[in-house]
Image: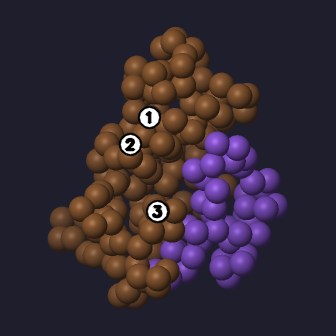
Amino acid sequence: MNEIDRDVRAEIYRLLVAGGPGPSAHEIAPGVGLDVPEVERALARLAEERRIALVPGQWQVAMAHPFSGVPSDHLVRIGDRTWWANCGWDGFAVLALLGDGDVEARSPLGSGVDTWRVRDGVVAPGGLVHFVVPVREFWDDIGFT
Amino acid sequence: MQTAYDLGRSWYAGRLDRDWSPSTLAEAEAVFRQQGLEGDFWTFR
């Protein structure tokens, strides 16, 4: 990663932690002092290097792991603040990065929402996270993963 | 669930830092092993 890409990547995370959807090139540019085409080129490089994933056909961040830039089935809540995560693992990872809170997982079968609490790094209740994709295939289809 | 949280903590350590760099494949596999996740499913090669 060059210095521009590091700045753009850091700004993406700053904006995601602050809240809101995945930022666009227009939203990233002011924070890094670059023009929009420069940011777009950085986004392309970061996506090519699998540091982020973009919304198809757009200069908008879809994933900056563990954060999702688009609504997902995994909502992370700390107090009255919320973030979207890409999966259950990422939901817990958001809490590991930001502090204790809850992960609310909506069942893909439409059977409701399950909530896990993390307090002082301890998760309750118990349960299972099912990894469907072997790790070497994570990025073959990162949206599915 | 606790394993998933602990894995998230290790896997994403430092991810918000500007100077974060990705792990090597060996380092990444070591993170899984530290959580007891071993075998072909958890290897990158």
Instruction: Indicate left or right for B14 with A52 as reference.
Output: right
Residue B42: horizontal and vertical position, in percent? 67, 67
Q: Is residue A41 above or below residue A129?
A: above
Residue drawn where x is 64% and y is 68% of the image: B10
The kind of residue on which mark 1 rests is Val
**Residue B44: x %, y % from top left:** 73, 57
Chain shown in brown: A
Q: Does A2 appear above or below A94?
A: above
What residue did someone put label 2 on?
A69
Chain B image colour: purple
Q: Earlier in the sequence, mark 1 or mark 2?
A: 1
Secondary structure beneath label 1: strand
What colouring does the structure picture have?
by chain
Confirm whether residue A95 shows in the render. Answer: yes
SS under mark 3: helix
Is residue B39 shown to the viewer in this render? Answer: no
Q: Give the mark, 1 or 3, whose residue is nearer the N terminus.
A: 1
Q: Residues within 10 Å of mark 1 (few under 14, many from 20)?
A: many
Q: Which mark is residue A61?
A: 1
Q: Secondary structure at mark 2?
A: loop
Residue drawn at 45 percent across, 22 percent down = A30
Q: Is residue A45 left or right of residue A110?
A: right
Q: Chain of mark 2?
A: A
Side (left or right) of B3 relative to B40: left
Q: Are marks 1 and 3 in contact (CB under 8 Å)?
A: no
The reply to whether discs 1 and 2 touch (Cβ–Cβ < 8 Å) is: yes
Which amino acid, by three-letter code, is at mark 2?
Gly
Up-down relation of residue B43 to residue A21 (above or below): below
Disc 3 target residue: A98
Which tag is nearer the camera, tag 3 or tag 2?
3
Instruction: Mark 1 vs mark 3: tell me if same chain.
Output: yes
Q: What is the CA distance from the residue labelled 1 to the residue labelled 3?
A: 20 Å
